[in-house]
Amino acid sequence: MDRRWENIPAEQIEHLAEGLKPGAYLSDWMSADTDVNKADAVLGKDLHFSFSNDNKCSCRFGSVNNLSYSEDGTAPVDCFYRILPAPGHPELVFIQFYLDGQVPATCVQLVLDLDTGYCVRVKARIGSVPAYPREVTHDIDFGMAEEIFAAGKLVCAGQPPHFTDDLTGRAIMWQMPEYTCKPPIKHIYISPEYYAIRMTRPDGTCFMSADPADYVKIKDGVYLISAIEERRSGIQLTFLINTDTLEDIVGHFGISAGNEKTSEDPRIVCTVMTGRKGRWVPMETFE
């Protein structure tokens, strides 16, 4: 059984990356039609992040759409970014940006607590798997924004984000936003290392897949799941979920399957989706 879309040579992926213009990767591929953001929370700030693996990076938020990103003392890179508040948690923001002009093609996602300074960084790359260049690989780092953490150090910050198995054995049926033209999708959190999906297509056939996933507890009622579509088109999916209201933000990064919306050609996408609504369902059933 062919379980993946067509493979793409590394040279073609580099060509796709070279042809991108700032912000062009957003297009309309599974992305929100509205430009909801929380840029005012960080606008004009120069934040320095320290991570538990001794890596450091900085983000200077020069405008509502552009930031300057530097990592471990390297030259700053200007990036188009999206920033959205976590559902039900205005103190948490999800920041996603593509590093224009970088080889391999790279996306950075930050979940930042504006009260405590705690931060989770997901850094993803296309082209790190020689046998399957379109597949995304990622690193997850835990750290803090030094300026925010220092200012709030007298406040009880609670437990910092950490890997978790809290969701293992549970499942959520997600109703997709109307603009995606997608049927409801059941997410099954089958283990601390994998998640599965099940959906019924419009023609009545069933699709199921299991992919590697990392689970992070941000704080009570808020979880980050970062999964790689190993059995599908190789895209990274990052879900920031409020498990009380069952709403989320979804970040995509990778080579599109070439069958979304009106496009037939594979392309690099780095998009953000909002508007999903979920409900808890039994993991064992076909519901």
Image (cartoon, grey):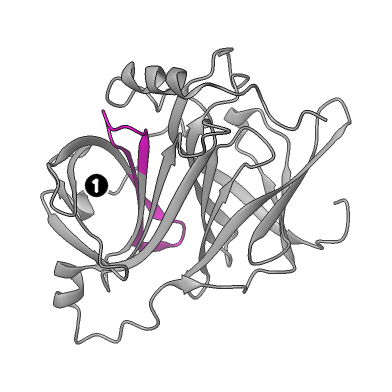
Prevalent SS, magenta region: strand
Tell me the SS state at disc 1. Answer: helix
The residue to which callout 1 is attached is 39
Residue 60 is covered by the magenta coloring: no
Residue shown at 86% from the left, 25% from the top: 203
Q: Amino acid at mark 1?
A: Ala
Percent of width and height locating residue 154: 19, 87
Q: Which residues are magenta?
A: 83-107
Residue 88 is covered by the magenta coloring: yes
| Quarter occupied by the N terminus | top right
Give the left or right position of residue 8, taking residue 36 as reference.
right
Percent of width and height locating residue 167: 65, 69
Percent of width and height locating residue 85: 37, 54
Q: Quadrant of the rendered structure where residue 67 is?
A: top left
Give the left or right position of residue 242, taking residue 184 as reference.
left
**Above-or-below relation of 140 to 200:** below
Depth check, front residue: 62 or 211: 211
Q: How many marks?
A: 1
Depth check, front residue: 120 or 244: 120
Residue shown at 27% from the left, 25% from the top: 22
Percent of width and height locating residue 80: 26, 34
Mark 1, other Cα within 10 Å: few <14 / some 14–19 / many ≥20: many
Q: Quadrant of the rendered structure where residue 68 is?
A: top left
Residue shown at 37% from the left, 33% from the top: 105
Depth check, front residue: 102 or 40: 102
Residue shown at 32% from the left, 19% from the top: 18
